[in-house]
């Protein structure tokens, strides 16, 4: 058969299973202090209301810019500056208050280290997250206990028990943790001890590692030392674990950078250096699924959360703004069903800063929405996924160029998610024939599409000349014109079978709904 001709046959009365929407569990975010911005909070409200997102996870709730632990000697010329320290969780509370107000719960990442408690000065990112161990363990534990008491006092034990507390971020990467994994395991144990000494029912886990690493070693440590672990969290990307790391090739490009004129953007300068688009090959198709299966085999019956994942770990990767990201997203979360209990896509918004704050309309940022609030193809993919029922047909997972996932609603309607995910730089179309056997008879069929000309705002931006700043009119035009299309499909029903024919392009996502009435 021609590789561009694809057929699917499914049985309306076929085997089904109940599934959960792991992708609604949580969403990633820029560091905590950004949550004080009104545009940040408005975009977070959108992903909650329109996509059903339940929680948000961000780095740096204990960063110095959150003022959680201050030394008087940092501001006044007093002796013994390290002995007088003030805890304040006011800034955290103002953020958490706003999250809960819009219906989002925090997924609490414990980190980074307040400078006043730190053993060293090593930091990460532009916001200077301190990645060293605590100087005094008893002081760290006292700080954690005070934090937990504050949360329970403000929000009540019942509410805080519904949250999750994750100790640190990617301790297996030297940029995020100055210490060995054994050092991390000890820090985890001491932190859990402090949290549960206040309330033993709070849910704490780790190791929050990059590349699904060190899970077995972490769990063995917890078992050997009788350390509680309520869930396992880890991270996965299809390419390298830190997309903006410096190697010899990139360093040479950086040295040769020339702005050309005063109006060039930081994104335009750095994207050619750090973008890893050439690293994506079709061998990576299904990679996150295979890694999740491996992680599940190590975790056993504990909840497994992927608290960071995306198509790229590079904060300026053009692929984030494209339909490749949306097809990758759909395949990943649907493959995850039944394996991963919760996932957290990285991130909900391009209102984000680690190396820089990129203000371009489309900067290749991690977000589902741009800095201006434009909904990218990945956002629309989540919006289509939000429509799916929780009853899924037991069809095989196959890494084909075109794949199908099928769902049945309580009223008998059928939802068919078709997606063509590939990384090749080719223009390809697929002729798809889909047949439903033992059909009860459908009234009509509709399809919503995300492809090169539907649900694809970056293409509209390119068509108007890639302006570095959007006018109000240009912004309104892109927002209005970039929604996924919705059209009727012809149903061919004969005897007890119904067939649908449609054409799909590369990296297209199509949600078909067959209505009984």
Image (cartoon, rainbow, N blue to C red):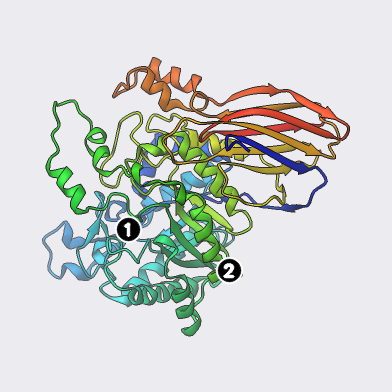
Along the line of sight, the residue nearer the viewer: 493 or 347: 493
Secondary structure, mark 2, is loop
Splitting the image into 4 quarters, where does residue 490 fall? Answer: top right
Name the spot of residue 414 as percent of width and height, x first: 75, 37
Mark 2 Cα within 10 Å, few/some/many (few <14, many 20+)?
A: few
Give how far apart the Cα atoms at labels 1 and 2 are.
Answer: 32 Å
Name the spot of residue 262 as percent of width and height, x first: 14, 26
| Residue for point 75% across, 36% down | 435
Along the line of sight, the residue nearer the viewer: 376 or 204: 376
The residue tagged 1 is 68
In this rendering, is residue 79 above or below 441? below
Mark 1 Cα within 10 Å, few/some/many (few <14, many 20+)?
A: many
The residue tagged 2 is 302
In this rendering, is residue 345 above or below 500? below
Name the spot of residue 129 as percent of width and height, x first: 28, 56
Q: Could you tell which of marks 1 and 2 lies nearer the N-terminus?
A: 1
Quadrant location, the N terminus: top right
In this rendering, is residue 95 above or below 492? below
**Residue 212 shows in the view:** yes
């Amino acid at each position: 058969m021609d590789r561009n001709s694809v057929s699917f046959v499914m049985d309306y009365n076929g085997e089904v299973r109940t599934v959960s929407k792991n992708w609604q569990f949580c969403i990633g975010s820029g560091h905590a202090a950004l949550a004080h911005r009104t545009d940040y909070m408005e975009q977070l409200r959108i992903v909650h209301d329109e996509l059903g997102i339940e929680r948000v996870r961000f780095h740096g709730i204990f960063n110095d810019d959150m003022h959680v632990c201050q030394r008087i000697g940092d501001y006044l010329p007093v002796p013994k500056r390290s002995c007088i320290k003030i805890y304040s969780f006011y800034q955290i509370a103002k953020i958490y208050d706003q999250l809960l107000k819009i219906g989002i719960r925090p997924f609490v990442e414990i980190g980074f280290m307040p400078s006043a408690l730190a053993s060293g000065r090593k930091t990460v990112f532009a916001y200077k997250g301190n990645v060293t161990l605590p100087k005094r363990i008893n002081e760290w534990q006292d700080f954690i206990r005070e934090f937990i008491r504050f949360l329970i006092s403000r929000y009540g034990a019942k509410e805080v028990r519904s949250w999750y507390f994750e100790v640190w971020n990617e301790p297996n990467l030297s940029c995020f943790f100055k210490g060995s994994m054994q050092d991390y395991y000890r820090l985890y144990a001491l932190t859990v001890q402090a949290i549960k000494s206040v309330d033993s029912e709070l849910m704490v886990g780790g190791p929050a590692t990059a590349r699904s690493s060190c899970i077995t070693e972490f769990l063995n440590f917890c078992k050997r030392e009788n350390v509680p672990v309520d869930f396992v969290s880890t991270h996965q990307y299809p390419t390298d674990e830190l997309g903006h790391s410096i190697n010899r090739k990139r360093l040479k490009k950086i040295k040769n950078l020339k702005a050309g004129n005063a109006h060039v953007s930081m994104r335009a300068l750095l994207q050619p250096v750090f973008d890893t688009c050439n690293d994506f090959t079709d061998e990576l198709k299904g990679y996150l699924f295979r890694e999740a299966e491996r992680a599940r085999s190590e975790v056993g019956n504990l909840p497994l959360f992927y608290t960071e994942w995306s198509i790229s770990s590079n904060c300026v990767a053009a692929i984030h703004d494209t339909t490749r990201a949306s097809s990758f997203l759909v395949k990943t979360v649907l493959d995850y069903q039944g394996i991963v209990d919760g996932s957290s896509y990285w991130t909900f918004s391009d209102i984000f800063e680690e190396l820089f704050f990129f203000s371009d309309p489309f900067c290749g940022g991690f977000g589902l929405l741009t800095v201006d609030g434009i909904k990218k193809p990945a956002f629309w993919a989540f919006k289509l996924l939000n429509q799916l029922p929780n009853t899924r047909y037991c069809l095989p997972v196959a890494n084909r160029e075109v794949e199908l996932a099928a769902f049945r609603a309580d009223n008998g309607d059928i939802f068919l998610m078709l997606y063509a995910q590939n990384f090749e730089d080719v223009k390809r179309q697929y002729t798809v024939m889909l047949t439903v056997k033992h059909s009860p008879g459908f009234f009509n069929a509709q399809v919503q599409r995300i492809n090169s000309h539907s649900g694809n705002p970056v293409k509209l931006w390119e068509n108007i000349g890639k302006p570095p700043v959007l006018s109000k009119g240009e912004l309104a035009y892109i927002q209005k014109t970039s929604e996924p299309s919705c059209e009727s499909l012809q149903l061919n029903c004969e005897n007890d079978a119904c067939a649908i024919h449609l054409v799909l392009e590369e990296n297209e996502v199509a949600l078909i709904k067959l209505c009984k009435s």
